[in-house]
Amino acid sequence: MSKLFLIIGSINCFLAVAIGAFGAHGLKSSLSPQMLQTFNTGVEYHFYHALGLLAMGIILRDYPASVMAGWLMLAGIILFSGSLYILSITGIKPLGMVTPFGGLCFLAAWLWLAISMYQQS
């Protein structure tokens, strides 16, 4: 599982850089400043949690019970960042209702990690 999360984390770091560059160069002139900021928030949280996924790849070597934290981070990237990307590009406002669920996944991931590491030590 450790290797899988190192791969998933690496792919997500690549995607965060690529999507961020796309936003900075390809969308700068076509999005309003507010929607560009929304897009950039998605990129920012995507990157933080992509690095978190890399960390999970290392952490899982010693704390295998923490694996759910990694899956929650990935779900958070998809729901939080993904919804912000689509919302900012399409302007479909109901997508904003998905974003908090991604945020909850991020929060649950970090809490799960702390609790599972505490319980395993």
Image (spheres, rainbow, N blue to C red):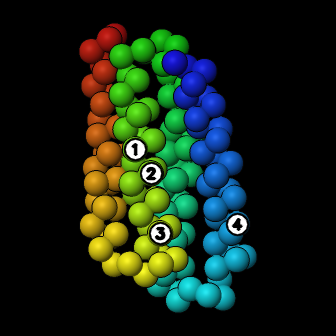
Q: Position of residue 120 (x, y in %)?
A: 32, 11
Assign a secondary structure to mark 4. Answer: helix
Mark in front: 4 vs 1: 1
- Quarter of the picture containing the C terminus is top left
| Nearer the observer, 94 or 72 | 94
The tag earlier along the polypeptide, 3 or 4, is 4
The tag earlier along the polypeptide, 1 or 3, is 1
| Residue drawn 58% across the image and 35% down it | 8
Q: Are marks 1 and 2 in contact (CB under 8 Å)?
A: yes
| Residue drawn 56% across the image and 51% down it | 47
- The residue that mark 2 highlights is 78
Determine the CA span between mark 2 and mark 3: 11 Å
Determine the CA span between mark 3 and mark 4: 16 Å
Assign a secondary structure to mark 1. Answer: helix
The three-letter amino acid code for the residue at tag 4 is: Ala
Determine the CA span between mark 1 and mark 3: 16 Å
The three-letter amino acid code for the residue at tag 1 is: Ala
- The residue that mark 3 highlights is 86
In the rendered view, would you say 74 is above or below 102? above
